[in-house]
Image (tube, rainbow, N blue to C red):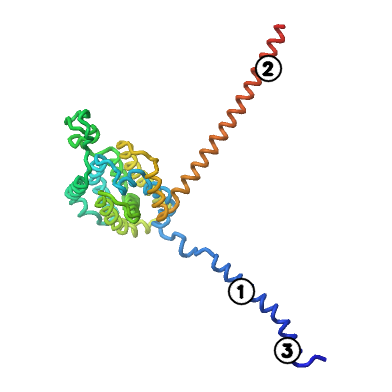
Amino acid sequence: PCTVPDQKQHKASYMQPKQAWHRALHRVALTLLCMQPAAPFSTPTTTTEQLRAAHRSERLNLLNHPLQIQLATGALPYGSFVRLCHDRSTILEAVRSAAAAAGADVLSAEVSEAEATAKAWLDAAEAAGKTISTGDPSIKCYACGGDHLNVDCPEDLAVTGPARAVAAVLRSYSGAEAATGVLAVCEYGWACDTLLKAGFETPYTGWLTAHAESLAKASAAVAPLVDAADRDAVDASYVAALSALFNFVDSEASTAGLKGAGEALEAARRKLDALEPGFLEAQDRNANFVSATLKAQAAKSSAGAKKMDAAAAYLAAKKAKAGG
């Protein structure tokens, strides 16, 4: 028979594996719990959040556009900045008007002070050395004879078609659609704010700061009006306004002849990707898709060419045999 100490020792040796198994199970349960996605915190709930989440790629395209990056780094040609400042008042007035149609009061001060604000920005840029002059006396503007490009002539300045298009889209809306259009155009403020956070140095800081602040306020003012509507009812309005805004930015980049590639641009995009990830990954996916498609087409063309060559060789041999 076992003594009492023997019985205790036997019980302890029996319980140890069982306790170890429970501890292991507990650790696994905790690990699985920690791995669960925080769905209640990450799932978009309001219409505003849903629109921004659904169209994040479009917003990232705006943020990473060469014109925006050159604004942030100071590489943007001065003539391009002059045109942006000239178009700005037209777009701001359209945003103010659309917001009013939806029942919100935004950007009144910015609209009334637009001309004075633009002059201050232009003066600051010129003080930093920005100019439309090419420094080449052989270049003569057809309108005024100055040594700048024709497109940069201050005497030939007019509101651009893409700026008027943004205004037209906004003015075509009413009610919740108008509020949604304003929300979409105000995404430009988010882009400017992100560029400022990236810490670039630029003589165009005034432009970025003003739009980051004023458009954030305008966006906040119309967001409750957008949230009162169902996303499906206003999605098209958001997309149309955001597309018009992107076209405005893209059109000016084309006018200025800005390049969409280069080490400086890619370095800036890597910096932005650390703040708002997704653009570079999408670029890589697109590049891989295009590469794979081109390779497949090349392989198909090569196979087709081999068949044609074989057919031609067969016909030549048959003709030679018939002639012999």
Query: Which residue matches tag 1?
Result: 26
* Secondary structure type for disc 3: helix
The disc, 1 or 3, on the residue closer to the chain's N-terminal end is 3
Residue at (34% x, 58% y) in the render: 223
* Secondary structure type for disc 2: helix
* Residue 178 appears in view: no
Q: Position of residue 296 (x, y in %)?
A: 57, 35
Residue 218 or 175: which is nearer the viewer? 218
Quarter of the image holding residue 196? Answer: bottom left
Residue at (70% x, 13% y) in the render: 318
The disc, 3 or 2, on the residue closer to the chain's N-terminal end is 3
Q: Please state which of the two labelled residues, at mark 1 or mark 3, is closer to the viewer.
A: 3
Please state, as top left, top right, bottom left or bottom right, where the N terminus lies in the image: bottom right
Quarter of the image holding residue 199? Answer: bottom left
Residue at (20% x, 32% y) in the render: 147
Q: Position of residue 320 (x, y in %)?
A: 69, 10
Q: Amino acid at mark 2?
A: Tyr
Dot 2 alpha-carbon crowd within 10 angstroms: few under 14, some 14 to 19, many 20 or more: few
- The residues tagged by marks 1 and 3 sit, at their Cα atoms, a distance apart of 26 Å
* Residue 137 appears in view: yes
Q: Amino acid at mark 1?
A: His
Horizontal side of residue 90 vs 317, given as left or right: left
Query: Which residue matches tag 3?
Result: 8
The disc, 1 or 2, on the residue closer to the chain's N-terminal end is 1
Horizontal side of residue 62 vs 129, given as left or right: right
Q: Position of residue 83 (x, y in %)?
A: 24, 41
* Secondary structure type for disc 1: helix
Residue at (19% x, 50% y) in the render: 117
